[in-house]
Amino acid sequence: MIFIAALLFIGLLIAASDDDSDCSSSETTTSSSTNADQTKRAKDLFDYFVNQEGFSGAGAAGAVAVAKKESGIDPAKENTEGGVAGIMQWSGFSNNTNGSRIMSEGSIVPGDKSTLTWENEIKLLHYELHKGYEDAAKTVGNASSASQAADDWSEKYEGLSADDEQQTKHSQIENDAEEFYKQFGGDSISANPSLISAKAAASSGSSSDSNSSDDSCSSSDDGSSSGSDGYVLPVKGTYSLGTGTYPSYTPNSTDHDHNGVDFQNQGLTDDAIKNGDEVSWVYAVHDGKVVAVNHNSDEYVVIIQQTDNKYSYYGHSMKEPVVSVGQKVKKGQHISFQGYGGDVRPKSAGAAHDHFGLSKKNSGFGPGDNDSILSPADFLPLPKEVLPDSGKSAAEKNNNDRVIGSGFTQFFLAAGTNTDE
C-alpha cells in the first residue's frame, strides 16, 4: 500500500509539471504561515482587487479563493518541480517548464527569492490584468456569483481547463469563494467599471522610449534642455505646454496663483479621456512613493514624495489614478490621466491636460505657498526655447516672467524637438 501511495504521489507531481497552466498548483512545498496570517493576506488581496482593480465583492472573493488553493496566499511559496512561485504560482521562477510569466512585469527576478515579495507580486498581478489578461479582469471583476468567479478565474487567469478537476478543484475554490464573500462583506461591493476597463499596465520603468530613458535628462543637440538627474517628463510622445504659464516659476509670475505647468498631449479626444487611452496617460517624473490620491468633486490628484525629498503633483484627471497611497513608483511609470476635472475651463478635450507642480512640502501647492513651490524648469528636460528664465538674473526673472492668456499652441516631442506651431 505504501508503494502504491508513493506511485500515486509521483503521478501527481508529473501531472502538475506537465500541465499547460502557467500557474499550476502543487503539494510539493509547505508554508509556515498560520491561519491568522493567511486570513490577513486574504483580506489584503481582497481589498486590492476591490480598491485597485475595481472588482465586485464576488469577483474579488473568487480570485482570492483560487490564490488560497494555489499557494495559501503565500508570496514566498515555491514549487521547484513546476518552476512556479508566488501567490498565484506564476511560471518561470526556478525553471521554464510551464512558461515564464513571473518575469513579465520586471520586478521579480527568476531564482532570486528576495524578489518574491507581496509588493512585487501585486505589481505583476496589476500588469497582467491590463496587459494580456483583460478578459479575466472583465469577466471576474464584474461577477455576481463568488463561486462562478472562482471557476472563471481558474480558467481565464490560471489557464486551467474546466474539465480538469484534479488541478482546478472546483468544490474547494467554490466553497472558499463563498466563505470569503461572506467574511469580507462582498455582497455590499459592486464592480467599478472605470477601473476594470482602464488600460493601465503597471510599468517597471524599463520602457525604451525617450521619456523613460535616463538619456532624456541629458544634454543633446536636438534643442532639448538638460533636466536634473533622475527626472523625466510627465507625458510621452507629442505634447504642448500651456501658454498661460511658463514652465518656470517665480512668485507672482503669472496673472493667477497657478503654481505649476500644464502638459497636454496632442490627439486627446473625449473618448480617449473617458476610456483612459494611452494618449491620455500621465507618468511619474521621478522615483518615489505615493503619499496622496485625492478625489475632489470631478478631479483626482496624485502627490508623490520623491526619493530626492521633493513632492510632485499631478492634477485634473477625471479617471481614478492607477496607483494607491503607499505604493512605490519608478520614473516613467504610468500613474494617472490627463483630463479637464477641477477648475479647468472649458470642460472639453481641447482644454484637458495634466497640471504638474513641484514643491518642498507635501501640502505646498496652493495659493500662499510661494516659499515652498519649485520651478519645474529647473528639473524637467524641457525644450530650451520655452525656458523664459534661461540666462536671466533674478531681477529679470521677476520682471519678465509674467504670461497672460491661456491655450496650447506649440507642440514638442518628449525629447524636446519642435514639431508644429
Image (tube, rainbow, N blue to C red):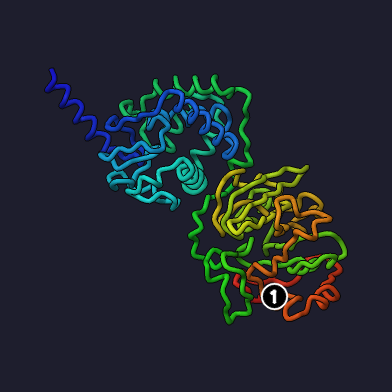
For the point 60% across and 64% down, the residue is 232
Is 33 situated above or below 316? above
In front: 176, or 270? 176
In front: 305, or 236? 305
Residue 71, x across and y down, in percent:
38, 32
In front: 382, or 36? 36
Res 417 visible: yes
Residue 234, x across and y down, in percent:
64, 60
Residue 318, x across and y down, in percent:
71, 47
Q: How many marks?
A: 1
Q: Is residue 386 left or right of residue 69?
A: right
Residue occupying the far top of the picture:
1
Q: Quadrant of residue 68?
A: top left
For the point 38% across and 42% down, the residue is 90
For the point 44% across and 27% down, the residue is 38
Q: Quadrant of residue 387?
A: bottom right
Label 1 element class = strand
For the point 57% across and 28% down, the residue is 57
In front: 372, or 216? 372
Is 210 situated above or below 121? below
Disc 1 residue type?
Asp
Res 133 visible: no
Q: Is residue 353 left or right of residue 224?
A: right
**Quarter of the rendering occupied by the N terminus:** top left
* Residue identifier under label 1: 420
